[in-house]
Amino acid sequence: MIGLGRMGGNMAERLRAAGHEVVGFDPRPDVGDVGSLQELVAALDAPRTLWVMVPSGEPTRNTVASLATLLDSGDLVIDGGNSRYTDDKPNAELLAERGIGYLDCGVSGGVWGRENGYGLMVGGTDEHVEQAMPVFDALRPDGPREEGFAHAGPVGAGHFAKMVHNGIEYGLMQAYAEGFELMQASELITNVPGVVEAWSRGTVVRSWLLDLLVNALKEDPTLDELEGWVDDSGEGRWTIEEAIDHAVPLPVISAALFARFSSRQDESPAMKAVAALRAQFGGHAVKSSGPAGGPGEKAGPDGSGG
């Protein structure tokens, strides 16, 4: 296991618990079992399986390029990070020149995966998937394989599937968040956490994400301890770019991504422009940017307008 962060470290422990021998490498010297990729390769008997769990982009590409010079024909590399699917074909081709196999695997489960198992979406050949199946079976949730594992297609399909998965996740989280805010704004609902928890069993909106929101509200019923600043790790953007290329409408996922962008603005220039226009054409009240922040005196020509 290359990369022993929140996901990689927990995955290594789940594999060990299932009886697999796991050697871990991490750039942090106090975390891994070995001090370098060379030592990692030397510690494993051929044919080796190496699971890469490092940040997407250049870190993953560099790791794969290094492994291409260290591994032997018949070894197998699995990229389980959140790489963009377009990186997978070049990685696979580079390794194939040396007889090394490659799989891309989208992994879902977060920090809970160590106990609950991970949802896996894999891209690659049937031969390489079969070679790694004992690893996949150890990582996926208990129960029927098809309920936690999918061979999605050829190289690239696993990360494409995970990209879409994360785009859907954006939309689900945004819908729950908007419903929470509306109930919190209403004077009629006096027990917002209770309503959210009541949705978690028997309703059509129940989900694991909803269960996590219930947990969060038990710890902080009004979420006052958090700032409403939300990052995005890239998959939502990539999903929308693919939708544009394929002319597939994704209004919900697009809106959810843009909502995350809005969360990072202390002041919105766009909304300032809207306020200025409303003041100009209709004489609507605006708030000054001064300390008081009260309604300004600016008004339109006759106080009328839409």
Image: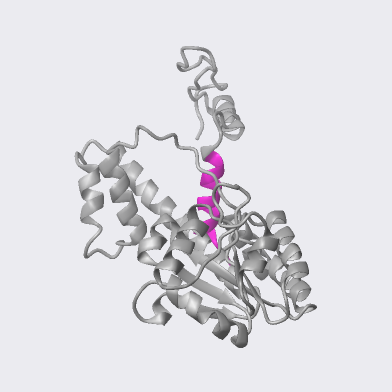
Q: Which colour scheme is used?
A: one colour
What residue lies at 64% left-to-right and 63% top-to-bottom?
Answer: 40
Image location (x, y in percent) of residue 225 = 36, 32
Across and down, in percent, residue 213 comes to 33, 50
Residue 89 visible in the shown view: yes
Most extreme residue toward the right is 97
**Residue range (magenta):** 248-262
**In the rendered image of this protein, does residue 190 appear above or below residue 278?**
below
Q: Is residue 266 above or below residue 99?
A: above
Residue at the (29%, 43%) spot, across then down: 217
Q: Residue at x 75, y 74 (%)?
A: 95
Asked if the stretch drawn in magenta spans residue 146, the answer is no
State which quadrant residue 277 falls in.
top right
Camera sees residue 118: no
User: Is 109 positioned to the left or the right of 220 in the image?
Assistant: right
Q: State the residue in front, 50 or 34.
A: 34
Residue farthest to the bottom, as pictured: 127
Side of 61 where 217 appears, left or right: left
Q: Percent x, y for residue 2? A: 60, 60
Q: In which quarter of the image is the N terminus?
A: bottom right
Q: Quadrant of residue 244?
A: bottom right
In this rendering, position of residue 16 left or right of residue 92 = left
Query: Which secondary structure class fits the magenta region best?
Result: helix
Task: Say above or below: 263 vs 238.
Answer: above
State the image coordinates of residue 38 (x, y, percent, origin top left).
Answer: 70, 62
Magenta stretch encompasses residue 251: yes
Residue occupying the point 50% across, 42% down: 230
Residue at the far top: name it.
Answer: 291
Please tell me which residue lies in front, 111 or 22. 22
Which residue is at the front of the view, 16 or 193? 16
Report the number of numbered marks. Answer: 0
Between 255 and 93, the one nearer to me in the picture:
93
